[in-house]
Image: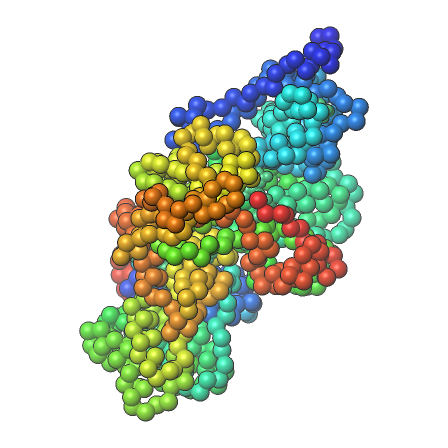
Amino acid sequence: MFKIVSAEFLAPEVKRFEIEAPKIAAKRKAGQFVIVRISAHGERIPLTIADSSVERGTITIIVQGIGKTTREINEHKTGDFFMDVVGPLGLPSHIENFGTAVSIGGGVGTAIAFPTAKALKEAGNHTISIIGGKSKEYVILEKELREICDEVYPTTDDGSYGYHGFVTGKLKDIIESGTKVDFVLAIGPIPMMKAVAEVTRPYGIKTVVSLNPVMVDGTGMCGGCRAVVGGQTVFVCVDGPEFDAHEVDFTLLMKRNNTYRSEEKSALDKHVCNIDKQFAEAINN
Amino acid sequence: MAELTKKERMQIPRQPMPEQAPNSRNKNFTEVNLGFTEELAKLEAERCLQCPKPKCIEGCPVGVQIKDFIKLVADGDYLAAASKIKENNVLPAVCGRVCPQEEQCEAKCVTGLKGESVAIGRLERFVADYERTTTGIRQAEIKTKTGKKVAIIGSGPAGLSCAGELVQLGHTVTVFEALHDIGGVLIYGIPEFRLPKEIVKAEVDALEALGVEFKTNSVIGFTDTIDELMTVEGYDAVFIGVGAGLPYFMNLPGENYNGVYSANEFLTRVNLMKAYKFPEYDTPVFDVKGKNVAVFGGGNTAMDAVRTSKRLGAANARIIYRRSEVEMPARIEEVHHAKEEGIEFVMLTNPLEFLGDEAGWLHGVKLKRWSLANLMLLEEEDPLRYPVQSMLCQSTWQLLQLVTAQIQSLKRQHPISTSINGVISRLKKPQ
Ligand SMILES: Cc1cc2nc3c(=O)[nH]c(=O)nc-3n(C[C@H](O)[C@H](O)[C@H](O)COP(=O)(O)OP(=O)(O)OC[C@H]3O[C@@H](n4cnc5c(N)ncnc54)[C@H](O)[C@@H]3O)c2cc1C
Ligand SMILES: Cc1cc2nc3c(=O)[nH]c(=O)nc-3n(C[C@H](O)[C@H](O)[C@H](O)COP(=O)(O)OP(=O)(O)OC[C@H]3O[C@@H](n4cnc5c(N)ncnc54)[C@H](O)[C@@H]3O)c2cc1C
Ligand code: SF4
Ligand code: FES
């Protein structure tokens, strides 16, 4: 059992947890993830390690409630336990001093990109962060990113905060304004990552994305997480999760992620969700 | 009862295993084999000739004292028989169910020369079940503590056997398992209807009672490394039993359509994650109800996958195998059971390509057929264009592929033993 030492909502349906897991905290590197299972009947859910504290022996995960299990995860509170947490899994991000590095997060992708952005800064890069959200309340981790990045640009689809438009619009502006961009990391919904890849492709900017196929074991044992990168089949859990954005077959990934569409929907419909109530409580406190 | 003569013994027919009727069992996940009754067990045990130089034991990889335990069964002392088996085998209920006895002990048994060999596996299972359901699994003796610590990586049958042996020798044993549950292939691969998970758990619990410590959620190489286990955590020896089971794909067009699975993924979803009980359990598996399923391969894995599909409601569940039936590596019992359950067998056939729709869903498979004589391609494009949801089943396992880069490189250099003092890796020939 893994104790939750703190839990708080960052945005609607987006919750941050600090969990006691000293071994993982000591080992993990930016870009790696854990698999969480909350009960004996539960699914194994991959979640990126957003941060860790070796002193406190904790790791931080940030979870977006989009389906049955992620919403159930988000019903957990400080003092509760997760049944299983295993990791750190996957290959760490490749970090070097590229020069100017832009990290782009869409929705909860910002949380996934956060540790790598931090590591890029520590490696000496000039770091620019673009945080995408539907509207203002979905722009997460701005304060935390401002502490570690040289420039931070929130963007919202509805223009309620920051740049009005998609992250790709802002990225284009940055590139076209003459800033020499050497590296781009993009993490978010598949269409966003695909769009970013198309923006940087003509400029030949090295671009990395973190893929999120459906996983089971996370140890390379099942092949369920396979994707095609550069014409080769890869197992994202052990060969990734980060890959060269210009080589990834995003269309295939999108199709494969639909495999359990109808089962997921029926599970979610059955799950009487009290997230909204919790969120209301959280912001009233 | 007077002692039977050799001739009389040889006249007793091999006792059949009571089992669920094919037509009801192919719709449920409860165990197919029901196990011997005492009467059947005794009768079967009487068939053993108590050879002065028993051949059977030569065929047993762990050297169970077969002749002696069978004698105890014939005498009706089942608990003593259980103790006898456990002198050499810590997983008798598991082995009695899934070992390929027909290639091991039973293949060597002299009675098999003229008639049918003694049903050693069934007797082993009977004895283990008898003990578990009457007294519960009784604890073996433990030698004086040696003060030595051993780390075992992987909790499949290799790791569990090693743990059982070492703890009885007085060592302190910890098993590290990457998954959230203990048993390796026994819990994620082999289905409930062949090996109930309760039975695996009982044998694991017995090891725990002996003092073996189990640490789940520990991927060695990631959560801990072998170096750390030996230097920081003070283990004197490490045993690597991480299995050989990584799927590889055949690199055929259409292999990534939704509906194409490795057997490992399909079986892991169904067995470990209990997808056959979805939505009571949260993990789903492709809904095969009323659909056509093709399973490529002829081993135990393929049999398990195809029989599982049938139980999940597949309209047609087929084995498609590139060679002919005699070459199929599966246990004979599994092939026999599969046929009884309505599984269709298509031999000398290979997949060429998977066919799918725009949205990425599998709709069919293009096959090629081979002639028996010289494995020549018979037809370029076979008329058999199965509409299927298919599983890809590895017909050979990719040997020695491992999860952890660390162990991976270790093994590449040293296929059987490693260069670190005290580290033994155990690699089984793939099935
Ligand atoms: C390496 C990796 C790291 C991840 N890190 C994070 C993280 O830090 N925070 C976070 O909130 N999420 C993260 N995810 C995504 C997260 O694992 C999924 O959102 C989760 O598995 C969905 O489970 P569910 O039962 O709640 O939803 P489901 O009911 O299974 O699915 C609901 C919806 O989500 C889609 N979906 C299913 N699985 C995934 C998936 N793996 N990724 C994206 N969409 C999916 C489905 O198509 C469906 O539309 C990560 C995924 C991977 C593979
Ligand atoms: C579906 C199926 C059916 C089968 N049926 C039969 C049968 O009827 N009869 C028969 O004799 N054989 C059968 N086999 C083959 C048999 O199961 C294997 O030979 C046997 O399981 C090998 O045992 P093992 O302990 O070496 O490995 P496994 O059972 O594969 O166990 C290895 C364990 O190590 C864990 N692990 C891997 N890497 C790490 C790591 N880095 N850190 C920690 N843990 C790790 C894995 O999660 C796993 O639990 C079958 C195999 C399959 C897949
Ligand atoms: S070889 Fe067969 S008959 Fe002889 S002792 Fe072994 S089981 Fe009995
Ligand atoms: S999740 Fe099973 S191999 Fe990656």
Percent x, y of residue A233: 44, 62
Q: Residue at x 28, y 49 (%)?
A: A262
Q: Is residue B293 above or below residue B334?
A: below
For the image, the number of numbered tags is 0
**Coloring basis for residues:** rainbow
> A35 or A177: nearer the eye?
A177
Q: Quadrant of the C terminus of chain A?
A: bottom left
> A165 or A238: nearer the eye?
A238
Percent x, y of residue A284: 27, 64
Residue A87 visible in rendering: yes
Percent x, y of residue B281: 39, 43
Q: Residue at x 28, y 83 (%)?
A: A172
> A55 or B297: nearer the eye?
B297
B93 lies left or right of B266:
right
Percent x, y of residue A183: 41, 81
A253 lies left or right of B164:
left
B139 lies left or right of B257:
right
> B272 or B260: nearer the eye?
B260
Residue A19 visible in rendering: no
Q: Quadrant of residue B253?
A: bottom left
Q: Is residue A33 above or below residue A221?
A: below
Q: Residue at x 59, y 58 (%)?
A: B220
Q: Quadrant of residue A66?
A: bottom left
Q: Is residue B74 above or below residue B390?
A: above
